[in-house]
Amino acid sequence: MKFVEQFDAWVYQTWKKFKGLTEKQQQFTYCLLILLAFFLISLINEQADNNAMWLDGSWKGPSDVYLIKSKKDECEYWDIKQNDFFLMENAQIAVNSSKRNIVLTKNSGNTEYHIIKLDRKRIILQIFNNQKKIKELGLERIK
């Protein structure tokens, strides 16, 4: 409870000091706060660069349903199914992946699944074999 009282007193004192500033100083302070907010948002965005949880789920294509599922909460290993048939088990995210372009592959295989995020509900799935694109599909998330 003491912390809350100290914090309340600090906020009150800071607000009093802010009200004592000239109009130009207040505008400058507002600009600094806005810049700080943008900086914090971009910093958080950079830290979440390889978070692939958005990919976890069912995706519907023109004729097939794809299930892309993380085996653990850490998004380390992934399974890819097409209509309940395993296309790849225990795939890992490749080093060259980013938050909008994820590459799932296995060390022992020549097949790669490139997933490009268009928005929250749409992705493009590209299938590569021996570094040659063999298929490209537009998929939509199934609720």
Image: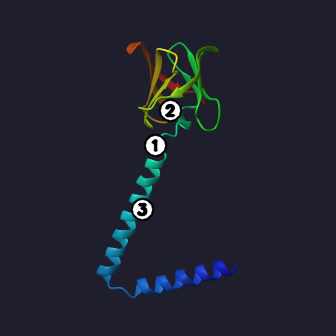
As shown in the figure, which amino acid type bears the numbered disc 1? Asp
Q: Which is in the foreground here, disc 3 or disc 1?
A: 1
Label 1 sits on a secondary structure element that is loop
- Say which residue label 2 marks: 121
Number of residues whose C-alpha sits closer than 10 Å to that of mark 1, classed few (under 14), some (14–19) or many (20 or more): few
- Say which residue label 1 marks: 49
Q: Which is in the foreground here, disc 2 or disc 3?
A: 3
Measure the C-alpha gap from mark 2 to mark 1: 19 Å
Query: In percent of the image, x 49 and y 36: which residue is there?
Result: 120
Q: Which mark is residue 58?
A: none
- The answer to whether 64 appears left or right of 123 in the picture is right
User: Which is nearer the N-term, disc 2 or disc 3?
Assistant: 3
Measure the C-alpha gap from mark 3 to mark 1: 19 Å
Indicate the position of residue 57 as horizontal and vertical percent values. 60, 29
- Give 111 or 32, whichever is nearer the viewer: 111
Indicate the position of residue 87 as horizontal and vertical percent values. 57, 14
